């Protein structure tokens, strides 16, 4: 008698445990999805273990009904990874296992696309059949002749050209034979698959490749923008493939994926698969299935690609490792880098974290020899990094310029366009303006469901909430006092485009932000138009800041560098330095020289000064000293417990009960808590739910132990009260 241990596919902590079932006589392997009786219903589940004994009376156990898929869909390393996530991030096993599958597969909404091919294998029989047809049987005669002329045809085409009932009759009469063919839905078909020869590496690149492929380790590759990190990744993958292994390449933004895919397809052809949320359901399923069946050997994608069903992994690369998008801030919450470390350990392979501006935590890990540091200090073309000019916008106002472009940037933009070159303008805020305000009474339009001001989107003639998506009509007079004299807040991408077209009327501009990239392939179209020269200026948020390689870009303008510098986060300076360095790196990447203009109201800030020299080591030294003095990560672990509920009193009550328990824990772990506090969240209400939080900073030595205790307290709270989220080192406390 064999017992199957099953995780039921229900995302609830109440059923997040293993259930025992009897295995049917037909063989079902571990990692299979199965149908099981659960209560009075039938549910899907995951078979995670097979054993001989059960702690329950075998006569009372129900039997697994059947397996769902032809083959197991979760391999042994993935099962171990799910268990790791449960331990490390306190995710439910069901939540973790779901990450390994296309979501549409779980509810049966997507399947293989089957093409039915029609052919005639007995031509004499077909011609004899034709001779017996009446002259008005045009569909039957036409269909037979069409197949005889073309050799074969898909049933879909035949049904369109001729009467479908005639085609069915020919199949029923055994004149037309059919065969099935699986058709793969290929994402980004327009991206080149032409195989190109290898590029000869520089001495530095070759040394880095040799290090990575000679010894399995965690490597931090610190290479300046334009130093050829992508070519290093591809050469490492080439060596891995030659040894019969597979690889994963992660990028932070969907917008980067087409460019990386183009590079990898040109080297490895159809051995490359792509996984990210921007694909259609069919494309995502087919790419996942190609990986599952071993047709694809290299997987490229955003953070979800770390869960790809690859076997025998030889290398994992996380490009732009500093990017905050590698941290999932919705359920299930996890750090992609921590997951990648565990997957690399399970696969006994190297993990490469690459960046021109590594996160302080990663660089500190390299300085303390937890990671191996690899450096590429020069651009591939041996050119110096482009000069970065800091513009004091306070002086601009004092000199009578109240516009969003400084005099120097206006002149540089005009010169760049006139010379036939391209420019990129960066501002990390979308929309036309950050708010709409009455100058007389101070009324600011706010969302009805969130404690945030509404952003003006002039092109759509709407006020939008960037937290819940609510839309409101733009008012022309104050709804509070009737005044028509209204002012707008800080500028966004839409306003930059508007002002640019006013400055240079005939300029062609593309805008790239969350508003313009909602449709499928929109990233690819915007970037392709810019790369081909159809558009002269690309305006965008952080989507345009990293990884892109445009040879004709000679000018980069950072419209308002202070946007990220004064956010309420201990990583504000770090994120600002990263963004400046990354976006500056888009200029002067080919033969043409580049220049960068950075506009700010605090030109003497150390972050800007060090960014203008591209001096990451000096910035790291300055910032890590501040972190050590103030006891922020990596010298502590920040834990945030967020409480949300539609009733403010319930949210407050739950927060108080939890906080009292944490205070007991603080006494138990005397000296381990650097800080403990309770407060309203900076944004006190989102989607009509009130938000409070308990914040703490804990010394790293016993942090994992204390974190588990904090999870346990949350688990034991009344489930009918507020929703509780535990976040570790959150990137955003708002």
Image (cartoon, rainbow, N blue to C red):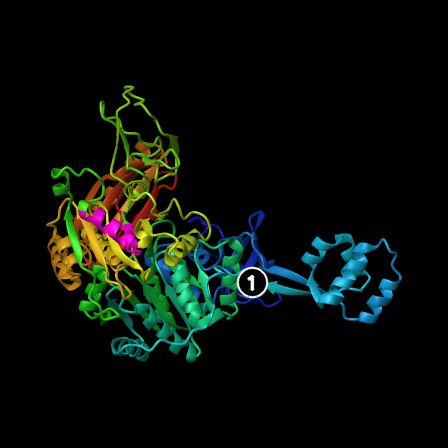
- Left or right, 137 with respect to 572, comes to right
Quarter of the image for residue 225 reads bottom left
Quadrant including the N terminus: bottom right
According to the image, label 1 marks what residue? 184
Q: How many numbered tags mark residues here?
A: 1
State which region is magenta. 408-425
Name the one closer to the observer, 330 or 257: 257
- Left or right placement of residue 302 versus residue 654 in this view: right
Residue occupying the far front of the picture: 418
The x and y percentages for residue 472 are 38, 31
In which quadrant will I find the C terminus? Answer: top left
Q: Which of 354/518 is in front?
A: 518
> In percent of the image, x 29 and y 61: which residue is there?
321
User: Picture coordinates of residue 584 (x, y %)?
Assistant: 24, 57
Residue 416 falls within the magenta-colored stretch: yes
Q: Is residue 50 visible?
A: no
Looking at the image, residue 469 sits to the left or right of residue 649; the answer is right
Whether residue 732 sits left or right of residue 82 in the image: it is: left
Query: Quadrant of the rendered structure where residue 708 is?
Result: bottom left
Residue 412 drawn in magenta? yes
Q: Main secondary structure of the magenta part?
A: helix
Residue 731: x and y in percent read: 27, 51
Q: Residues within 10 Å of mark 1 (few under 14, many from 20)?
A: some
Looking at the picture, does residue 721 appear above or below residue 591? above
Q: Nearer the viewer, residue 630 or 226?
A: 226
Q: Check the image and report above or below for 161 versus 393.
A: below
């Amino acid at each position: 008698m064999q017992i199957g241990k099953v995780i039921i596919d229900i995302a609830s902590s109440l059923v997040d445990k293993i259930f025992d079932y009897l295995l049917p006589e037909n063989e079902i392997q571990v990692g299979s999805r199965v149908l099981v009786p659960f209560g009075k219903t039938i549910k899907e589940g995951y078979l995670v273990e097979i054993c001989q004994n059960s702690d329950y009376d075998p006569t009372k156990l129900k039997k697994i009904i059947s397996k769902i898929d032809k083959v197991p869909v979760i391999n042994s390393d993935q099962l171990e990874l799910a268990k790791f996530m449960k331990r490390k991030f306190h995710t439910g096993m069901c939540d973790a296992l779901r990450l390994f599958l296309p979501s549409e597969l779980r509810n049966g909404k997507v399947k293989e696309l089957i093409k039915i091919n029609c052919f005639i294998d007995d031509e004499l029989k077909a011609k004899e059949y034709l001779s017996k047809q009446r002259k008005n049987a045009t569909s039957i005669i036409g269909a037979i002749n069409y197949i005889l002329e073309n050799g074969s045809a898909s049933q879909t085409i035949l049904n369109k050209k001729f009467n479908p009932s005639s085609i069915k009759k020919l199949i029923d009469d055994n004149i037309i034979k059919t065969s099935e063919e699986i058709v793969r839905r290929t994402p980004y078909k327009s991206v080149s698959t032409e195989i190109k020869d290898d590029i000869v590496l520089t001495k530095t690149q070759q040394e880095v490749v040799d290090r990575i492929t000679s010894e399995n380790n965690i490597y931090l590759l610190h290479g300046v923008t334009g130093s050829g990190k992508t070519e290093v990744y591809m050469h490492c993958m080439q060596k891995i493939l030659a040894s019969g292994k597979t690889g994963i390449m992660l990028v932070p933004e969907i917008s980067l994926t087409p460019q990386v895919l183009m590079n990898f397809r040109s080297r490895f052809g159809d051995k490359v698969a792509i996984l990210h949320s921007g694909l259609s359901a069919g494309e995502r399923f087919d790419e996942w299935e190609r990986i599952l069946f071993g047709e694809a050997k290299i997987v490229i994608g955003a953070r979800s690609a770390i869960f790809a069903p690859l076997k025998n992994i030889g290398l994992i690369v996380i490009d732009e490792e500093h990017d905050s998008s590698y941290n999932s801030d919705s359920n299930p919450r996890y750090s992609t880098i921590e997951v990648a470390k565990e997957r690399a350990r399970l696969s006994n392979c190297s993990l490469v974290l690459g960046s021109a501006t590594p996160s302080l935590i990663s660089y500190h890990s390299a300085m303390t020899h937890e990671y191996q540091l690899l450096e590429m200090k020069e651009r591939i073309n041996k050119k110096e990094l482009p000069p970065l000019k800091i513009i004091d916008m306070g002086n601009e106002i004092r000199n009578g310029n109240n516009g969003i472009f400084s005099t120097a940037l206006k002149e540089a933009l005009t010169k760049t366009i006139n010379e036939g070159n391209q420019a990129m303008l960066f501002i990390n805020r979308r929309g036309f303006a950050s708010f709409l305000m009455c100058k007389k009474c101070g009324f600011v339009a706010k969302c009805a469901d969130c404690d945030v001001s509404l952003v003006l989107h002039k092109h759509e003639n709407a006020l939008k909430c960037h937290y819940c998506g609510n839309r409101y009509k733009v008012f022309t007079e104050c709804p509070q006092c009737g005044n028509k004299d209204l002012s707008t807040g800080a500028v966004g991408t839409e306003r930059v485009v508007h002002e640019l077209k006013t400055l240079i009327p005939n300029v062609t501009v593309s805008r790239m932000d969350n508003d313009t990239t909602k449709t499928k392939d929109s990233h690819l179209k915007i970037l392709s138009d810019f790369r081909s020269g159809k558009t002269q200026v690309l305006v965008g948020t952080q989507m345009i800041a990293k990884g892109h390689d445009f040879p004709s870009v000679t000018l980069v303008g950072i419209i308002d560098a202070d946007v990220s510098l004064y956010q309420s986060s201990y990583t504000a300076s770090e994120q600002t330095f990263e963004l400046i360095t990354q976006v500056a790196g888009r200029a002067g990447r080919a033969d043409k020289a580049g220049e960068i203009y950075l506009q700010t109201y605090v030109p003497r800030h150390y972050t800007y000064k060090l960014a203008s020299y591209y001096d990451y080591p000096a910035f790291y030294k300055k910032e890590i000293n501040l972190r050590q003095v103030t006891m922020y990560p990596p010298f502590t672990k920040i834990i945030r417990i967020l409480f949300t509920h539609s009733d403010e009193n319930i949210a407050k009550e739950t927060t108080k009960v939890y906080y009292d328990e944490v205070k007991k824990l603080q006494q138990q772990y005397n000296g381990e808590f650097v800080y403990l506090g309770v407060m309203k969240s900076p944004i006190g209400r989102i989607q009509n739910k009130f938000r409070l939080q308990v914040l703490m900073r804990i010394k790293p030595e016993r942090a994992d132990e204390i974190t588990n205790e904090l999870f346990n307290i949350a688990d034991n709270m009344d489930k009918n009260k507020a929703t509780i989220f535990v976040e570790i080192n959150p990137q955003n406390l708002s």
